[in-house]
Image (spheres, helix red, strand yellow):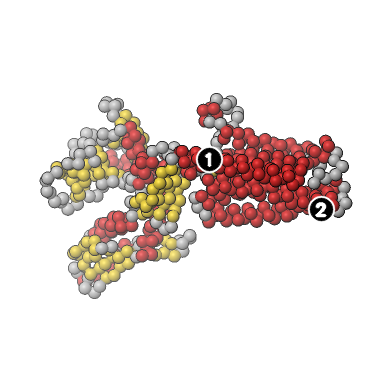
Amino acid sequence: MLHFPRWQVVLIVLVVLGGFLACIPNFFSREQLAAWPNFLPKKQIVLGLDLQGGAYLLYEVDRTDYVQKRLKTLVSDVRKTLLQEPRIGYTGLSIQGEGVQLRIRDLDKLADAQKRLEALRNPLASGLLGGTSVNEFDLTVGSDGLAKFTYSPAGLQQRVRGIVAQAIEVIDRRINALGTTEPSIQRQGDDRILVEAPGVGDPARLKALVGQTAQLTFHLVQGTVTAGQTQEPKPGTITVKSKDDPNLSYVVDEIPLMTGEDLTDAQAAFDSRTNEPIVNFRLSSAGASKFADVTTKNVGRPFAIVLDNEVISAPVIREPIIQGSGQISGNFSVQSANDLAILLRAGSLPAKLTIVEERTIGPSLGADSIRAGVIASIVATVAIAGFMILCYGLLGVFAVLALIANNFLMLGILTLLGATLTLPGIAGIVLTMGMAVDANVLIYERMREEAHAGRSTIAALDTGFRKAFATIIDSHLTALIAAIALFWVGSGPIRGFAVTLSIGIISTLFTAYLVTRLIVSIWVQVARPKAVPL
């Protein structure tokens, strides 16, 4: 029946009013909203990259760089394994192409050596539940004592997938520390990462933050080398260039005292003595214990703080540092100190990333897109309103009122959910407007049929709503399933379209049926019509 209990009327009105209130802040500037009373909603729709402008970066894992670093680690692991008691003699341990080879000198211990080296093949879990595994390396040991490690193709692929997953987490922490609104960080294929950061005013800074590996290590300094000097590093040491002085390099222990994994926090600050920007860091309990032990044994010696193979600072240990905290200085600006603190807090990337594609979208282009979207929405609303009124008269006016309520409700839901609105999302809104009146068309055509069949006015109106309801549910449900499928398998713009379409389908079902029915019910009670106005 057209009759509504009072509680249903109140509930419908409150839902529409809530959507209107949630939507209203989008029509005002942030400065104007700041002057509103605190009890009023102030949240606005989050605009996507194509509407707000910002940075679009597509990264690819540098497999060659990762493989070479991993092979260096493998060389170190092989050396440690064979030097364990009882020692096994070897020679020619080196990296060859994408593998490591060595020769076992004592062939009587070949079986023992192979058993030890087998443990370094590094099984990697594959599959959701880790039920199967692949080895990162393939190992062959000849009867002449020649042992070769080569990268397994399946193992490398599994490694790269893990690198991408870990890199996405690190990038997400870095970008969120910048205060960027709704960044989008997604996997593209097996070895690529797509980063979209709406509203970023300095894409170069974002690119530097995202792409920097940020591998922090602490090393004891064995000496320095200036430009022009030729000095072969002793075994167990490496030469690292100074970041501030291109003519200076440091000879440091190859094995670091600590790594960035021992840090629990890093914050930009100012040195109280020089008023220069610095970075204060705090260590984990295990890191603090190691740091205290190292500084106690090496008072008076310099140690190098190395970031991505560059010495950013090489202070002298004046006294044991046992508090588990310290500071990094090195001719920082305020921004560079803050960026370094962000990198250290977020952690290092597991591998080097290279930029495959880079785009910067200006805010003026986004403003043009918004303007075009608004114009398209207004044109669609006016055209649909004209069609409905022309075809269905007064009932068409009721459908237009429900359509307006649907628009406010849809934008209000998007605002409350914090969903990102993109240009395809605007297309989804415009499409939903056409779908919104489809339900009204089904209802009104059923009313017309009932009226032509001789039904009374009230019976024709009521039957139109009741008989069309099942068809409306079916059509909206199938459209919702399609939208969910788009969201599930799509990415980027496709998801933006799917989100607005899904929300529009739900709000349309509410307004086209319940809101229109409530308006018709009120009109019947007030006007007491003698015929269906169709």
Mark number displayed over residue 499: none
Q: Is residue 500 above or below residue 116?
A: above
Q: Are marks 1 and 2 in contact (CB under 8 Å)?
A: no
Give residue 88's position: percent from left, percent from top. Answer: 22, 64
Mark-to-mark CA distance, 1 and 2:
42 Å
Viewer-nearest residue: 385 or 152: 385
Give residue 533's position: percent from left, percent from top. Answer: 81, 44
Give residue 474's position: percent from left, percent from top. Answer: 70, 55
Mark number displayed over residue 370: 1
Residue at 59% from the left image edge and 53% from the top image edge: 483
Q: Dot 2: within a 10 Å radius of its alpha carbon, few (fewer than 14), some, or many (20 or more) residues? A: some
Residue at 79% from the left image edge and 41% from the top image edge: 521
Callout 1 secondary element: helix
- From this viewpoint, is residue 383 visible? yes
Q: Is residue 442 above or below residue 52?
A: below
Residue at 57% from the left image edge and 50% from the top image edge: 498
Q: Amino acid at mark 2?
A: Glu
Q: Answer left or right for 68 relative to 376.
A: left
Viewer-nearest residue: 472 or 260: 472
Q: Amino acid at mark 1?
A: Ile
Residue behind mark 2: 449
Give residue 8's position: percent from left, percent from top. Answer: 75, 40
Does label 1 or label 2 sit earlier along the sequence?
1
- From this viewpoint, is residue 282 visible? no
Quarter of the image where one finds residue 216: top left
Viewer-nearest residue: 37 or 358: 358
